[in-house]
């Protein structure tokens, strides 16, 4: 059945701390999102996420909807992952490397309630395309040589 996750890795020309600060602030997620589905953090979202934080997001994929996420993995400046009600996870791993940070974003549906349905859907392919665009956007925020 495969390993039930898709990831993309890119080196971004900034320190892990700078990227992590964007990831732990739900209000910044629409700036990063390359899929075009993340609209805004809902009122009452924590200003800074930590393990166990719950945060709602306004989304749009055809129709508008809301989704509640829970932070399920957290290591300061290195790792954050949140899951939706269905159990699948969005994970960001940050590793300092020469020239910046190796960023790996993963859509992991191995933890989903019904993973085979996700495997049969268009979501893995669409999410991989979205991740590629997200990392393009992130790279654009920290151009090489900008000293940020």
Image (cartoon, rainbow, N blue to C red):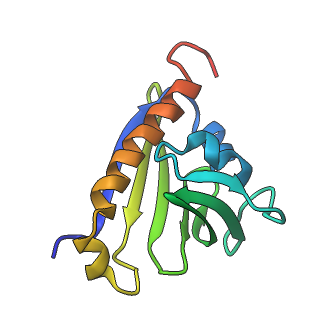
Above or below, 64 against 69 in this view is above
Identify the residue at image location x=49%, y=29%.
139
Q: Is residue 25 visible?
A: no
**Which is nearer the eye, 128 or 147?**
128
Above or below, 114 against 28 in this view is below
Give the x, y percent position of residue 93: 47, 53
**Which is nearer the eye, 71 or 64?**
64
Q: Is residue 19 visible?
A: yes
> Can you name the residue that lies furthest to the right here?
44
Q: Quadrant of residue 54?
A: bottom right
Asked if residue 39 lies left or right of residue 126, the reply is: right
Identify the residue at image location x=57%, y=42%.
32
Total count of labels: 0
Give the x, y percent position of residue 9: 36, 43
Q: Quadrant of residue 3?
A: bottom left
**Which is nearer the eye, 111 or 40?**
40
> Can you name the residue that lies furthest to the top here?
145
Above or below, 77 against 6 in this view is above
Quadrant of the image for the C terminus? top right
Quadrant of the image for the N terminus? bottom left
Above or below, 96 against 100 in this view is below
Give the x, y percent position of residue 35: 46, 47
> Can you name the residue that lies furthest to the front here?
63
Identify the residue at image location x=53%, y=19%.
143
Identify the residue at image location x=37%, y=55%.
127
> Can you name the residue that lies furthest to the bottom here?
113
């Amino acid at each position: 059945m495969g390993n039930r996750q898709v990831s993309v890795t890119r080196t971004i020309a900034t320190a892990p701390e700078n990227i992590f600060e964007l990831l732990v602030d739900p209000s910044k997620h629409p700036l990063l999102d390359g899929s075009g589905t993340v609209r805004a953090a809902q009122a009452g979202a924590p200003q800074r996420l930590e393990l166990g934080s719950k945060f709602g997001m306004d989304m749009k994929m055809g129709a508008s909807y809301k989704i509640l996420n829970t932070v399920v993995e957290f290591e300061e400046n290195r790792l954050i992952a949140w899951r939706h009600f269905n159990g699948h996870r969005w994970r960001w791993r940050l590793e300092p490397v020469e020239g910046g940070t190796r960023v790996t974003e993963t859509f992991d549906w191995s933890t989903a309630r019904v993973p085979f349905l996700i495997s049969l859907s268009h979501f893995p392919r669409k999410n991989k395309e979205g991740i590629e665009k997200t990392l393009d956007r992130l790279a654009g925020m920290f151009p090489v040589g900008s000293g940020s």
